[in-house]
Image: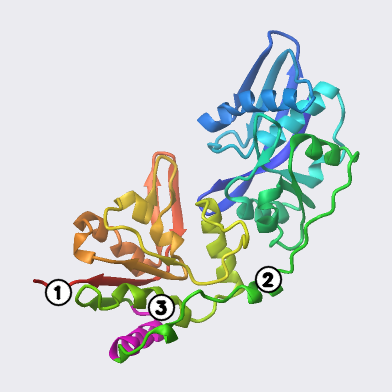
Amino acid sequence: MLAKVFSGAVYGVDAFEVEIEVNAAGGNPVIVVVGLPDVAVKESKDRVTTALQNSGFRWPQGRTTINLAPADVKKEGPSFDLPIALAMIACTEERELPFAHEFCFAGELALTGAVRPVRGVLPIALEACKRGRKKLVVPAGNAREAAMVSGIEVYGVYNLREAYEFLTGEKPLLPLREDLSQFFTQHQEYDVDLGDVRGQHHVKRAIEVAVAGGHNLLMLGAPGSGKSMLAKRIPTIMPRMTLEEAIETTKIHSICGLLDPEHAFVSVRPFRAPHHTISDVGLIGGGATPNPGEISVAHNGVLFLDELPEFKRSTLEVMRQPLEDGRVTVTRAAGTMTFPAEFILVAALNPCP
């Protein structure tokens, strides 16, 4: 029997739809995953079969082929566990999934059958909505993040059995609804404020001018003079983020796994202060499959480089193009990706002894 469900995968800062086909047939009992899976996806067959057993389900005993389409794009991460498991159950039970085309699934499975949160749910939700999927089933820990997308019903599940019973109509679930505009306006407060700083009038004036014009800033002063303290308060006087800026920034933070589970949405200007030992890849992004670096995580916010002379020369040189263009293009064997990188650069250093 053949079963088909839909999921999504992140590529750069966006997502693309993945069609998951599971075919169970006779022959030797073996599970084959095709469609350019990485190690985490290949290992999913072991997680899925154990989760099925511990959830009270059987899995196909013959040759099972799992295809992830499109087959020419590499698939990464454990987010395909849940859709693969649901399709395998449908094959074992020989039960059609009549409304599967309306759903998009994403989630990692524990060996117990519990559904664990994954990265990049917001881009997947945006892509599912664009593709016309009406319902999105994700881990309960990611539900609030996905619910920020209007036009799609989001259901958070805690375990595999709950997800399957909901898909087959045996157990009703209520969609999680969030008023994005109201949530956005209620969570635009900062923990610090520039008004907390006493004195330093000339520095505060320079900061105001830099922020008003979108200029970069270099602070030179003795240790303990308040450079870091002032830098942390720069985002508080920047213009409030627009909803479009917030969604774009949240996508990057979701992919990097930096979202706060309580808020699940970035509604204030980010402030990033990487240590001076950071590598070139850590700053601008990269890896075997390129991921965003610190300059992209600071998109629409502030990137603070403390102790500027301690940074490696090569690390500072790679920032030249992002500072000029507002984006960074990373080329690797796996492909070329462009990440947004519009930020205010604030650097601090001590005077020469």
In the picture of the structure, the residue carrying the numbered disc 1 is 351
| Residue 281 place in picture, x, y as percent | 34, 49
Q: Quadrant of the N terminus?
A: top right
Considering only order in the chain, which callout, 3 or 2, is on the residue closer to the N terminus?
Answer: 2
What segment is highlighted magenta in the picture? 202-215
- Is 214 contained in the magenta span? yes
Mark 2 and mark 3: Cα distance apart in space = 23 Å
Q: How many marks?
A: 3
Q: Is residue 232 left or right of residue 126?
A: left
Residue wearing tag 3: 234
Describe the element under mark 2 as helix, strand or loop. helix
Residue 273 included in the magenta stretch of the image: no
Residue 183's mark? 2
Q: Position of residue 50 (x, y in %)?
A: 68, 23
Q: Where does the image place residue 49, in percent across and percent down from the top left?
A: 68, 23
Crowd tier of the residue under label 2, counting other residues whose Cα lies within 10 Å: few below 14, some 14–19, many 20 or above? some
Q: Is residue 197 left or right of residue 53?
A: left
